[in-house]
Amino acid sequence: MARYNAKESEERWQREWHSRNCFLTPAVSDKPKCYVLEMFPYPSGRIHMGHVRNYTMGDVIARFKRSQGFNVLHPMGWDAFGLPAENAARDNVSAGKNSGTHPREWTYANIHAMRSELQALGLAIDWTREFATCDPEYYKHQQKLFLDFYKDDLVYRSEADVNWDPVDMTVLANEQVIDGKGWRSGAAVERRKLSQWFFRITRYSDELLRALDGLEKWPEKVRLMQKNWIGRSEGLRFSFELSNLTRLDVFTTRPDTLFGASFVAISPDHPLTEELAKSDARLRDFIAQCRKIGTAEAEIETAEKMGYDTGLRAAHPFDPDWKLPVYVANFVLMGYGTGAIFGCPGHDQRDHDFASKYRLPILPVVVPEGEDPKTFSVAKEPYVGPGKLANSRFLDGLDVEAAKNEIASRLEAQGKGKRTVNYRLRDWLASRQRAWGCPIPMVHCAACGVVPVKDSDLPIKLPDDLDFNVKGNPLDAHPTFKHTICPTCGGAATRETDTLDTFVDSSWYFARFADPTAADPVNREAVNYWLPVDQYIGGIEHAILHLLYARFFTRGMHDTGWLKLDEPFASLFTQGMVLHESYQNADGNWLYPEEVEKRPDGTAVAKGTGAPVTVGPSIRMSKSKKNVVAPMGMIANYGADSIRWYMLSDSPPERDVDWSESGAEGCWRFAQRVHRLVTEVEALPPPGAKIGDGVLQGSSLDLRRATHGAVAAVTDDLANLRFNRAVAQAYTLANAIQQYADADGAVRREALEAIVLMIGPMMPHLAETCWEALGHETLLVDTPWPKADAALTKSDSVTIAVQVNGKRRGEVTVAIGAPEDLVKAEALRQDGVVRVLEGRTPKKIIVVPNRIVNIVA
RNA sequence: GCCCGAGUGGUGGAACUGGUAGACGCGCCGGACUCAAAAUCCGGUACCGCAAGGUGUGUCGGUUCGAUUCCGACCUCGGGCACCA
C-alpha cells in the first residue's frame, strides 16, 4: 500500500489546475456571483502563518462556493507601497552601497518570492488579475480618482496642526496615532503646523455611522468600534458674550447644567488664546507648558488640570450680571467641538477637578431621585446620573432631557444658540513626506496657486533614480522630479512631492480587481456585476483604519460616478491570530522553536548545549520573540494540505489558534488516513453505481445516515464559516466509514465520495488524488457539491433522556412521534427511575416530544 | 475611568430557538500486530466512590419541571476608547 506523497501530489495538481486554467474567473455572466476576498498582503518578503490562516479560510469559501455553482471571483494582489521598502533602501546606504537599492527592486523581488509561496498553498486564485499598488498602471488610476475627488471637494489642502512622527519624518493620520505614538515607529508624535492634503471623510460622518446598522454580516465588535470612532454626540452650540464684547462659541451635550456653570475654558490652541498671547508673556509660557505635556505620552494619563485666568469675563446667557471667569485650560481640545467649553463642576469629573484646584464654586443643579435638593452635595464628587433640576430658575423640577430641550429652545429663540451634532471623526490627513508612495498629482504655481495635473498627463510617475542618501523626502531632493510647468498658465511651477498614505491604495483595490486592465479606474459593467465583495476576510487590527477608509472611498467613488453602491463589503469576517509558545534561556535571550528540545517530563532544553530553557506562554508569533514557525518549512514537512487543515481545525476561526508540532502531525495523520480509506478499499463498484432499491438495514443504513448527516452538517458549517466544526464532522464520517466496513459497496462508495468532496475545499490536493483513485476522470474541482437526502438525515426513532427532578436517570428509545402515554410508561420502567422513586408516585410528568421526559417526584 | 467580549476535562474546543454537558481533535492509559521499534488498528479517559450514588460549565443568588444557555450581583482574563465637553 502506497503512502500518500503530499509533495508529489501537490506539485502535480497545482500544475494540472494551472494548465487547465481552472481558476480563471469567467466573465460577467447571468450566473449568481460570489466575490471572495482576503485582505491583500504587504510584500515583506516571506509569508507567515497569519497569511496562511487568512488565505486558507478565503480559499475554502471560494472553492466551496464554486462547487455550489457560483461564479467566483477570488483574486490576489499586493499592498506594495510603504515604508519598509524605503528603510531597506536606507539600510543599503548605511551599508555603503551608494544611493541604495530602489524600493521598487526590493518590492518586486519580495512579490516574486511571496507569490510562489502562496502558490505552494494551492490557492484557487485567478492569478491573471494580480497587480501591485506600486504598478504605475494602478496608481495612475488612483491619481485620476484623487483628481475627481478634488473636483468634487472631497480633497482639499489646508494648514493644520498635524501629527508629526520625528522618526519616520512624516505626518500621520489621527487613526495612525496610538497612545500618542506613531503606529509604525512607536515614536512620540509631535504637533506641527503644516499645509497638508485631506480627504473630506467628515462629509459622510453621519452616513458612515448610520449605514453600520445595515452591515448585519459584520462582526458586532467592528461596528461598535467604528461607531465609537465616529463618535456622534448631540448637543447645543451657543455663544457667551465676553467683557470685550466679542463672542465665544462653546459646544455642550449638557445644556441642562448651564445654571451650574462656574467658569468658561478655551483651548491653548484656540484663536482667542493666540490673540491674547500676543500681549501676554505669561500666557505664552503657559501655552508652551501645555504643549510640552501634550507630547510626553507617559504624562498624559496623569496630567493635572492646568488653567490660566485670562482676566476676561463671560456673561451668563440668562443673566447678564452673572460673570464667569474665562480660563485657558490644558484639557480643552481644539480639535473637538469649538475648542471652548463652559465648566459645570457639579456634574462633570474634569470640570470638578479643575474647579477644586482653582477654588471655583461647585453647585448641584441635578438632584437624583430620593435626594433632598437642599442637602444634596457634589462638593466631593460630581453627580453624572439622571435626576431633577434644581437651583436652575425656570428649569427647576424638570428632568434632564426636558431641561436640555427647554434651554435649547430658549437659546435658539433668542438667536444665541443652535442644536448641533458633533462628531469625533476628523478629516483624513492623507499626504505623506515619503518617496515610495503614489505621487499626489498636483502642481504649485506662484501665479495660479494649487493646480491639478491634467488627466492626460497621468500617471505622474515616480523617478527611477531615487537617492536615499539624503535627509527627508528623496522625492523632494530629486534633481528634476519637481520641476514642471503650470497646467494653467504654462509658467514654471513646482510639482507636489508628497505622496499618498498607503491606506489610500487599499481603499479601492477591491474594485480594481473586477477588471484590472480597465482603461478607467474601474470598468463600470464589471464592478456593477462583482461588487460588493460578498465575503471579506482579514485581521481585526483593521477594524477602524482600512475598513473605515474603504467605506469612505466607496462613497466618494459613488459620488464621482464610478460606483453605484455605498458599502464595499457585504460580509466581513475577522480571523484570529496564530500563536506559539515562547522560549527563553537563562540569560533571558529568546530562542527559535527549532533551537529547543522538549523533554518527556515537560521541561525544555536548548538543542546541542542542553542548557535549561523557560517555556513561556503562547503569544502572537513575532520575529522579536523568535516564536515563529516558517510556513514553507512546515509545508515541506507535512504538505500544504495538512497545514491548511490545521489552520481550520480546533479553534473557531475568529479566535486565536496555538501552533504546535503535534497538532500538525495529527493533521498529517488524518490526511494519510483518508488516503488509506480510499485506496485500501476492496471491490468497490464503479463510479455512478446505484444503491440497491431494497430496504437498507444494519451497517449499510447506518453508514448512509452518517454520510448524509455529515453532508448536511458540513454544508451548513462551511456556509457559516464554522470551519472547526466542519473538520470535526469530517473526522466523524471517517470514523463511521471505518466502523461500518461491512456496508454495501455502493453505500461505501457514496460515503467515500462524500468525504472526499467535502474535504475538497480544505485539503484540495489530497481530495483530487482521492477522487482520481475512486475512478473519476474529471477533476474534483469541477464536481458539484454533494447534496444531503433529508429523508436520511432523520432517523425514525429517537433516544431521549429520562430525568427525575431534572437529573438524568436513564434513556429510552422510542419511535418518532410516539404517543405520550407510551413514552411515560417506558420512562417509568427505567431501572434508575424505579430506584430513585422508591415507590413514590410522581407528582407530575413532563414529556417534551422527541426530546426529554422529566418526572417530578 | 468608560464601552465591548470571554471564562466548560490534562489540553484546543462541541452542545440548534432552555431539554442526555464534554461531539471531534491533541495528550495520556491499556491491548493487538511486530524479534523490536515506527506506523496502523481496537478499547478506555470530567471528578469523588468498590458500588449504589454524589458533584460538576469562573463565584454567589434568582426564574423554571429542567439553566453552559435567561435575569441580578460579583471575580478574573482579553480587547477597544480615553481629558471628546
Image (spheres, helix red, strand yellow):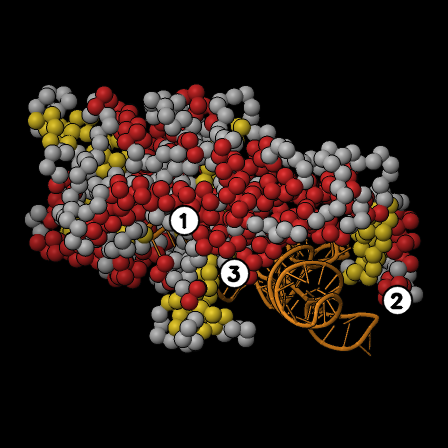
Q: Secondary structure at mark 1?
A: loop
The quarter of the displayed image where residue A834 is located = bottom right
Q: The C terminus of chain A appears in which quarter of the rendering?
A: bottom right
**Residue A154 rendering spot, x and y as whole percentages:** 29, 29
> Residue at left 43%, top 28%?
A514
Left or right: A72 with respect to A402?
Answer: right
What mark, if any, has residue A6 been given in the picture?
none
User: Is residue A153 visible to the viewer in this orientation of the structure?
Assistant: no
**Residue A669 rendering spot, x and y as whole percentages:** 61, 55
**Residue A794 rendering spot, x and y as whole percentages:** 78, 41
Please give the residue where the numbered disc 1 appears in the rendered image.
Answer: A47
Q: Amino acid at mark 2?
A: Arg
> Residue at left 11%, top 31%?
A483
> Residue at left 11%, top 49%?
A277
CA–CA distance in space, label 1 to label 2:
63 Å
Chain to which the residue tagged by mark 1 belongs? A
Please give the residue where the numbered disc 3 appears in the rendered image.
Answer: A661
**Residue A675 rendering spot, x and y as whole percentages:** 64, 48
CA–CA distance in space, label 3 to label 1:
19 Å
Q: Secondary structure at mark 2?
A: helix
Please give the residue where the numbered disc 2 appears in the rendered image.
Answer: A835
Chain to which the residue tagged by mark 3 belongs? A
Left or right: A578 with respect to A499?
Answer: right
Q: Amino acid at mark 3?
A: Glu
Chain to which the residue tagged by mark 2 belongs? A
Q: Earlier in the sequence, mark 3 or mark 2?
A: 3
Vertical placement of A740 versus A606: above or below?
above
